[in-house]
Image: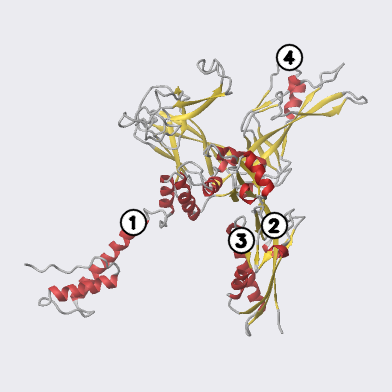
Amino acid sequence: MANVPDIKYYDKDFNTLKQDLINYARTYFQNSYMDFSPSAPGNMFIEMAAYVGDILSFYTDTQLQETLLLYAQERKNIIALAYALGYRPKVTTAASVVLDVFQLIPSDGAPNYNPDFRYTVRLNKNASIKSTSNPNITFLTQDVVDFRFSSSFDPTDITIYQYYTGTANPQYYLLKKQVEAISGQIKSTTFSFGNPQQFPVVTINDSNIIQVLQITDSDNNTYYEVPYLAQDTIFDESLNLPINEPNYSDDNSARFLLRTKRVQRRFVTRFDDDNNLMLEFGSGVTSLPDEVIIPNPDNVGLGLVDGISKMNMAYDPSNFMYTNEYGIAPQNTTLTVQYLTGGGINANLPSDDINLNNTLNLNIDTYNLNSSIVNIVEGSVRFNNPDPSSGGGPGETTEQIRLQALANFPTQNRNVTKADYLIRTLSMPAKFGYISKAYVAQDYLVANDTDKQNFTNNNPLAISVYILSNDIDGKVTRASNVIKQNLKTYLSYEKMMSDAIIIKDAYYTNIKVNFDISILPAYNSQDILSKCISVLKDYFDIAKWQISQPIIYSDIYNLIGSVKGVQSVLKVTIENLAGGNYSPYSYDIESATKQGVVYPSLDPMIFEVRYPDSDIYGRVVTY
C-alpha cells in the first residue's frame, strides 16, 4: 500500500508554509533534491510556492471575514450587510423646528371692523425659508398652512396690527399659525430609460441625501418606495365615508379606514459606500393600474407556496398576499426624481434666525377682492422660529452602522425589550430629527410605593423613553416637541399592543473637573499639564457618554497617572455648573458621591463637560 503524504492544512503564513514544503521535500524527495540553502535554485521555487499560498490564505480569510458583519472592515460590505439585516444607514440627519407663520388681513370696515377672512392665504407644503445667519441653510414646511382654518390642534391667533389714523378702529389684523419644518432643500434629477431591463439601477450622485420625495414618469405615473421589491402593497388610509367604502362606512366606531394599495410601479433605495443613493426598480412589464385592497379572510395569505394551511404563517400586514412579482421596470420613458438633501449639525440654528422667505407657493382666491390689498397681504407673509432648531446631526460612521445593524436585527420589526426600544429610538429616520442620547425605563420599577400603586391602576407596562438632542454647537440640549411627537409616532408603529409609550426629557448636568498633579524632574510642567487635559477631554467627550452613566474617580486618577511624566495625582474634584450658558439643572455632586463614584440621579440624566477648554482645569503642584 502506497504511503499517504502527511499534508498539514492548517498552516497559512509564509514562513510556516516554506518550512512545511522543505520538510515535505526532505521526506518524499530525499534522493532527488537536498540543497535547501538560501542561494539554491530549489529554494526559489519553494519560496514562490509559499508566497502564493500566503496570498491565497490571506484572500480566503479576508473574503470570509467580509461576509460577517461583526468582523467586516470595508465600509461597502458593512453597508451591504446592514441592508441585508433590515437596517437602513443614515448619511445625514435633518434638524427640525416649529415656525411661526404670520400674515396681515384687512378689517371689513364699518360698522364692525372685523377681520376680513376673504384675504387669508393658503401656503402649500414645502415652502422654503432661509436662515439669516447662514442663508445656505433652508427649512421646508411639512404641512399646508391655511389661515382660514382654525381648530384646537391648529389654532389661528388674531391680534390687531394697525388702526386707522386717529381712530380706535382696526385697519389690519395680524394672523399667526404654526407649522413644523425640517432643514433641507429639494433637488431634482432625471433618468432616461429605453427598452425594459430587469431590475435597472440608477444612482443619484449627491451628498447629504435625506430621502426621495417623489418619482414620476413622462406619463405622470407615480413610483412608490417600498422596503423591498417583493412588497407590492403600501398602506393607505381614508376617511370612513360612503364615497370611500360603502361596505364599511356604516360602522362609526372608526374615523379612518385602513386599506392597502397594490402598486405596480415601485422601487427600493440604498446608499453606497460613497453616500450616493442608488434606486432599483422592478423586473416586469405590465399595464395594470394600481389597485386598492381591503384585507379580508379571502385574500390574506393568497399566494402561499403550498396553498394549504395558514396556521403557522407569519404575515406582513403590508404584503399579506405573498406574490412573486417584483414590480415593473421603467421603459421608454424619463423619470423625474425629487429628493431632499441637507441636515447636519450646522442646521441647529438659534431662535429668531429662520425668517428669510425663499420660495413660497401661496394661493388666495382673488375674486371680488381689492388687488392693492391682495398685494399687501401676499407681501406680508413672514416666518420666524421662536425656539432654536435642533436634531441636526452627521451621518453614521462605519462602526455605528455595524453596531446599529447588529442590534436592529434581533428585534424583527417589533419592540419587546428595553433594548429594542432603545435601538428603535436611535434609528429613527433622518428627516424626523436627531436624537443624540436615549434611555428606556419602566417608571414603575423606580417609583416609590405610592407611585407604584398609581402606575398599577393605570398601566404598569408603560415605557418611558428619555431623550436628548444637540444644539448647533453639538452640546446636549432638550429635544423639541416636534422630535418628541415624531418619535412617539415612530415607536408606536412597532410597539406591543399593551405597551404605552411616554416620551420625556432626560436631564443633563454640567460639570467642571479640577485636578492637581506633581511631575517628575526634567519634564516640562506646561507640556505635561496640556497632555493631562487632553486625555480628560477625550475621556469626557460627550459622544462616549450615556444617560445614567456614573463618574468613577479611580478611572480619572488612573487616566491622568498614565500620562508620561506625571509623578502622582494629588487631587481630583468635580463641581456642578448651572445657569447661564450651562444646564438649568443643578446637582449636588457631594451628596451623590459614594465611595469614589459620582452617581446620577434616579431621574435619568447625563453628565456633560460643556466647555472642555475652560471646564477642565489642572495645576502642577511643587514642594
Residue 342, above or below 572 = above
The CA span between labels 2 and 1 is 46 Å
Q: Amino acid at mark 4?
A: Asn
Q: Is residue 138 visible?
A: no
Q: Amino acid at mark 1?
A: Leu
Q: Earlier in the sequence, mark 2 or mark 4?
A: 4
The residue singled out by tag 3 in the image is: 541
Residue at (71, 79) in percent of width and height: 621
Left or right: residue 203 versus residue 241 is: left
- On residue 64, the disc is 1
Q: Earlier in the sequence, mark 1 or mark 4?
A: 1
Q: Amino acid at mark 2?
A: Thr
Left or right: residue 44 versus residue 237 is: left
Residue at (55, 23) in percent of width and height: 238
Residue 320, above or below 519 = above
State if disc 3 and disc 4 touch (CB < 8 Å): no
Spot occupied by residue 28 in the image (x, y as percentages of width and height): 13, 73
Residue at (25, 69) in percent of width and height: 50
Q: Earlier in the sequence, mark 3 or mark 1?
A: 1
The CA span between labels 3 and 2 is 14 Å
The residue singled out by tag 2 in the image is: 509
Residue at (67, 49) in percent of width and height: 449
* Of the two numbered discs 2 and 1 in the rendering, the one whose residue sits closer to the viewer: 2
Q: Furthest residue to the right?
A: 166
